[in-house]
């Protein structure tokens, strides 16, 4: 029975996670369980939530109906409340190839910053190896949407 418990736990554990490191990042993932972005399938696509509305009670997210998982633009939608929009509608994706994780910018204007180096945007490099513990800023180097990439499953 002990082995089956381990197998169950292993099957429920995501391969990697993105942990918000700033207040803005935490607020952007309000719809995620425990405020952590779980990455279980690849490619994992991230972009900006466009269904944000406002009324007398404040901001809200309009209900999303998915016809098909195949037609979805993103696996996770972040809320961008910054003055200068940092998060693109289709910002980046994380892929897994063999034992390597790759972050690919999806044509965002601001790019994606990994450990204080910006990729994509106006730069020509739009793909970068992602390592356990890397710090990702969704957007330019001054973006407040800061996350830490953590690998949970070792191959």
Image (cartoon, rainbow, N blue to C red):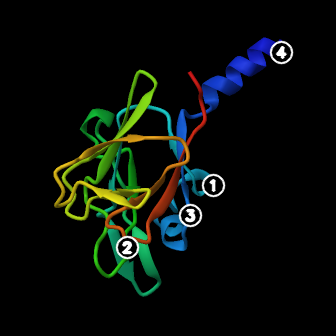
> Which comes sooner in the sequence, label 2 or label 3?
3
> Which comes sooner in the sequence, label 1 or label 2?
1
Identify residue for label 4. 2
Identify residue for label 3. 21
In this picture, residue 79 sits left or right of residue 127: right
Up/down of 45 relative to 108, above or below: above
> Which comes sooner in the sequence, label 4 or label 3?
4
Q: Residue at x 47, y 84 (%)?
A: 57
Q: Position of residue 14 (x, y in %)?
A: 56, 34
Identify residue for label 1. 34
Determine the secondary structure under disc 4.
Answer: helix
Identify residue for label 2. 142
Is the C terminus in the top left, top right, bottom left or bottom right quadrant? top right
Nearer mark to the viewer, of 3 and 1: 3
> Which comes sooner in the sequence, label 1 or label 4?
4
In this picture, residue 123 sits left or right of residue 4: left
Front-lying residue, 47 or 62: 47
Up/down of 36 relative to 10, above or below: below
Q: Residue at x 44, y 66 (%)?
A: 145
Determine the secondary structure under disc 1.
Answer: helix
3D distance between C-alphas at marks 4 and 3 = 35 Å
């Amino acid at each position: 029975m002990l082995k089956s418990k381990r197998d169950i736990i292993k099957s429920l554990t995501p391969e990697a996670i993105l942990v918000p490191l700033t207040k803005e990042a935490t607020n952007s993932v309000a719809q995620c369980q425990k405020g952590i972005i779980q990455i279980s399938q690849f490619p994992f696509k991230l972009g900006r939530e466009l269904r944000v509305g406002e009324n007398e009670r404040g901001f809200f997210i309009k209900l999303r109906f998915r016809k098909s998982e195949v037609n979805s633009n993103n696996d996770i939608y972040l809320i961008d409340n910054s003055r200068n929009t940092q998060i693109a509608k289709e910002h980046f994706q994380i892929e897994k190839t063999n034992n390597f994780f790759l972050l690919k910018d999806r044509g965002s204007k601001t790019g994606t910053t990994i450990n204080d180096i910006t990729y994509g945007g106006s730069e020509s490099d739009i793909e970068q190896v992602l390592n356990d513990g890397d710090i990702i800023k969704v957007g330019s180097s001054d973006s407040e949407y800061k996350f830490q990439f953590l690998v949970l499953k070792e191959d």
